[in-house]
Image (cartoon, helix red, strand yellow):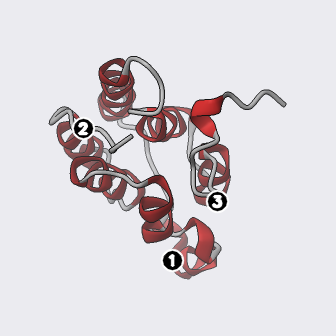
Amino acid sequence: MIRPDYYQDNGGIEPIDVWQAWELNGFLASAVKYIHRAGRKEGADDDLQKAATYLMLACERKVRFDYWDRGSERAFVRPEFQYWAIVKAWNLPPNLREALGALLFARSWLDYKVAANHITRMETPDA
């Protein structure tokens, strides 16, 4: 498996682990990847724009994130992949923490627009 350097600084949590633990679809998985990667690779602004674009595509297509519809199954996300563990491991700045939270805890496709708006504030992690 190819693991570029910018995916190594992840506090032990890779984007693919988050996708699998939260069972994200392609749009949301891509947004998570770019949120993680921003500031770790040249072109942080491009990564933030890509994350916002994927969230807006999910919003435009009214992608349904049925995580909440599964009720108590939410409790089965392993502790190392819960929201605060990811935020801490990835050292996310406030705007990206809020974007990730809006993405993972979305109750409607409109919440993806909220997440995209947080991203466009263009703060990146301290490198």
Residue 95 in picture, x, y percent from top left: 22, 48
Which residue is painted at 65% across and 57% down in the image?
Answer: 12
Mark 1 or mark 3, which is nearer the start of the sequence?
A: 3
State if disc 1 and disc 2 touch (CB < 8 Å): no
Hey, which quadrant is residue 44 in on the image? top left
Residue furthest to the right: 1
Mark 2 residue type: Ile
Q: CA distance from mark 3 to mark 2?
A: 22 Å
Q: Mark 2 and mark 1: span between their CA atoms? A: 28 Å
Residue found at x 46% / y 51%: 65
Q: Nearer the viewer, residue 112 or 96?
A: 96
- Choose mark 3 or mark 2, whichever is in front: 2
Give the labeled residue for mark 2. 119
Mark 1, residue position: 71
The residue positioned 30% from the left and 43% from the top of the image is 112
Q: Position of residue 27 (x, y in %)?
A: 48, 32
Sequence-first tag of 3 and 2:
3
- Which amino acid type is shown beneath numbered disc 3? Ala
Task: Please rate how many residues cluster around mark 1, counting C-alpha atoms within 10 Å: few if below 14, some from 14 to 19, many from 20.
Answer: few
From the image, tell me which residue sits under label 3: 21
- Would you call the spot at circle 3 few (<14 residues within 10 Å), some (14-19), or many (20 or more)? some
